[in-house]
Amino acid sequence: MDSTNADVALTRNRLRLELLPLLREKFNPQFDDALLRLAQQAAESVELLDALADALLNQVLLDESATVCRLDAAQLATHRNRSSGKLCGGCGYAGTGLDRKWASGNGSDWHNSSRNRAPSICQGD
């Protein structure tokens, strides 16, 4: 057993020993089950968004190399973020997970780069 498990000065223990029992007592005796369902729903949403990002990337990818990935900006712009109706100001990114796909394959997070865009990626035809 971890000797720090009872130390409520640590956030993880304070959550487990104080907050979770309070949530069960005051709000929902089945809070643990509700939290588990929420986590499962979030995981399913991430899986769906990843699949949608893969499909969108396949639609808009013009060509790629080790240093450049060209996307069809006009095609990408047709895929607006349904919740806000907004696109990224620089590149047309609509919150679909393409930045995560690019980062996972190339070791960089282009969407969070300076100027909120990476010119080699945000070039459109």
Image (cartoon, helix red, strand yellow):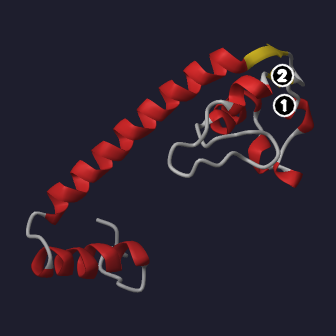
Relative to 101, 17 lies left or right: left
Q: In which quarter of the image is the C terminus?
A: top right
Q: Position of residue 26 (x, y in %)?
A: 13, 82
- Do callouts 1 and 2 mark residues in contact (Cβ within 8 Å)? yes
Where does label 1 land, which residue? 121
Horizontal placement of 102 versus 64: left or right? Answer: left
Q: In the figure, 22 relative to 67: above or below?
A: below
Q: Which residue is drawn at 83% across and 23% down?
A: 69
Residue drawn where x is 44% and y is 38% of the image: 46
Circle 1: element type: helix
What's the residue type where badge 2 is placed?
A: Arg
Residue 78: which numbered mark, if any? none
Residue identified by numbered label 2: 70
Q: Looking at the image, which is closer to me, 71 or 44? A: 71
Residue type indicated by callout 1: Ile
The quarter of the displayed image where residue 28 is located: bottom left
